[in-house]
Structure formats: structure tokens, C-alpha cells
Image (tube, rainbow, N blue to C red):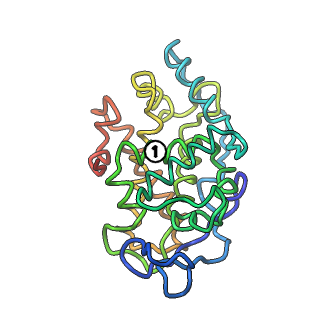
Amino acid sequence: MDDRGGSFVAVRRISQGLDRSNTCHSSSGSTAWLGRGLSCVCAQRRESDARPSFDLTPAQEECLQRLQSRIDIPYDGSVPEHQDALRDLWNAAFPEEELHGLISEQWKDMGWQGKDPSTDFRGGGFISLENLLFFARNFPKSFQDLLRKQEGDRSVWEYPFAVAGVNITFMLIQMLDLEAVKPRTLVGATFLKFLAENDSAFDLLYCITFKMMDQQWLSMRASYMDFNTVMKSTRRQLEKELLLEDIMRLEDVPSYKLLTR
């Protein structure tokens, strides 16, 4: 995904899961990469006039500021902490395969656009890497299922896992209006109630959203040209579930039940 917009590449799915035996990415392997050119709906900002704002409690304000501090951190490949996090992501995704370097053709197996994942973090920042790591560590079964496309009747041309994850981070930041001083939407105000109770609420919502997006993808029998449509549908469904009257915590969101550890 390009800086605050851009595109992602699609991955052609030849067989169920990833074929670890082929590292040359030839036409007989598990993946083949298409050219760029699909703009992501999550990068299209929606302008609205005179949106209301919601007052925050001191606890909510403090939690929002901490989250905004995370959002403001760009990914920097020269920072050791960021390098370590990227290595940790690889080890969580492919624990039995040694990573040859932070710049390597191997990263394409995870669904990055090229051999250097740092170029794909520009739209989501370091928090998008943290989101992926949280997903891998807390819901490893669901993480692996989505990474390897192991569930459902999959499309021949699938969405690239890692870049889709960065898109989801960016979509959530927009949907929840997290760069504003205070929320200007009901769904944003509702989320801050969850955040005040759980510092990891954004990361957890990310996991829910990723799994929800994949379910939408399958139910719509989508292919790579449908990614924007799937993201729009996912956003509508997520907003609907967050605003249900009986939701007291994120674990009560109906789509949370889709996640498995």
C-alpha cells in the first residue's frame, strides 16, 4: 500500500496453504505476484461537515493519547526495536523456516509486495506491525489459517495477507477517528469505552476485523478486484456490531467468536 493511498498486489493461489518447498516463486510454486494498481478503500478519507464530538472521561482521554502516540510512530527499519519486531513476526508466521534477512524474497510468502516489508508500512506505521504480532501471538490458529488461506472455498487470486493487514490497521484508524482530539462518531466514542477498560482494545479489534474481513471475502466469493468492496462491507458490519446494545466489551462482539487460539 502506498503512502496514505496507493495499491497492493494480489497473490494467485495455486494450492491449499503455502508450499514451503519452492522459494524461487516460479510459475509452479504456491504464489505468483501481480502488478500494482488496486487502490484500497481504507485510504479514501471521507469528509463530512459539522460532525459532533463526544466528551471523554479523564481515563478515556489518557487511553486515547497513548493510542495516538502509538499511531504516530512510523516504521523505521534502522531502529533495532522495529527490526526485532519484524523478525518476531517472521518467527511467529514461519517458526520452522530461518529468515535470511530483513530484506529477502522470503517476505513475499507472507504477502508483502516485495522483498523489503518496510516499504509497505508507510500507510500504517509501526502500529500495523504491532497489530500483526498481537494477532500471531494471541490467536495463532486464526493467524495461520488466514496466512495460509486454509479455510473456505478460496479464490484463484487471493488478497495478500500482510498488506491486507496494514490496510485493516489504517481502516480502523479512520473508522474510529483516532487522530482527532476527541471522537466525532458514535462508533468512535463507543470504542473508547472499551479502550479505557483494556489497553489492548485496538489490537483485539484488529484481530476481530481481520477475521471478519476474511469471512466477508469468502461469503462474497471475492477475488482480488473485489477487495475494496469487501473492505466496505467489513466496515459496515463492524460498525453495526460495535453499536449493538448488549455489547459491554469487545469479547461480546458477535464476530469475536470467529477467532480461535
As rendered, which of 71 and 225 lies closer to the eye? Answer: 71
Rendering quarter of residue 37: bottom right
- Give the percent coordinates (x, y) of residue 134: 44, 42
The three-letter code of the residue at mark 1 reads Tyr
Which residue position holds label 1?
A: 206
As rendered, which of 49 and 225 lies closer to the eye? Answer: 225
Residue at the extreme top = 58
**Residue pictured at 33% horizontal, 31% vertical:** 249
Residue at the extreme bottom = 28
Left or right: residue 16 versus residue 32 is left
Mark count: 1
Left or right: residue 167 versus residue 196 is right
Left or right: residue 79 versus residue 32 is right
- Give the percent coordinates (x, y) of residue 62: 55, 17
- Give the percent coordinates (x, y) of residue 184: 58, 31
Q: Residues within 10 Å of mark 1 (few under 14, many from 20)?
A: many
**Residue pictured at 56% horizontal, 66% vertical:** 106
As rendered, which of 220 and 15 lies closer to the eye? Answer: 15
As rendered, which of 155 and 21 lies closer to the eye? Answer: 21
Residue 193 to residue 79: above or below: above
- Give the percent coordinates (x, y) of residue 72: 67, 34
**Residue pictured at 62% horizontal, 36% vertical:** 71
Residue 117 to residue 206: above or below: below
**Residue pictured at 51% horizontal, 47% vertical:** 88
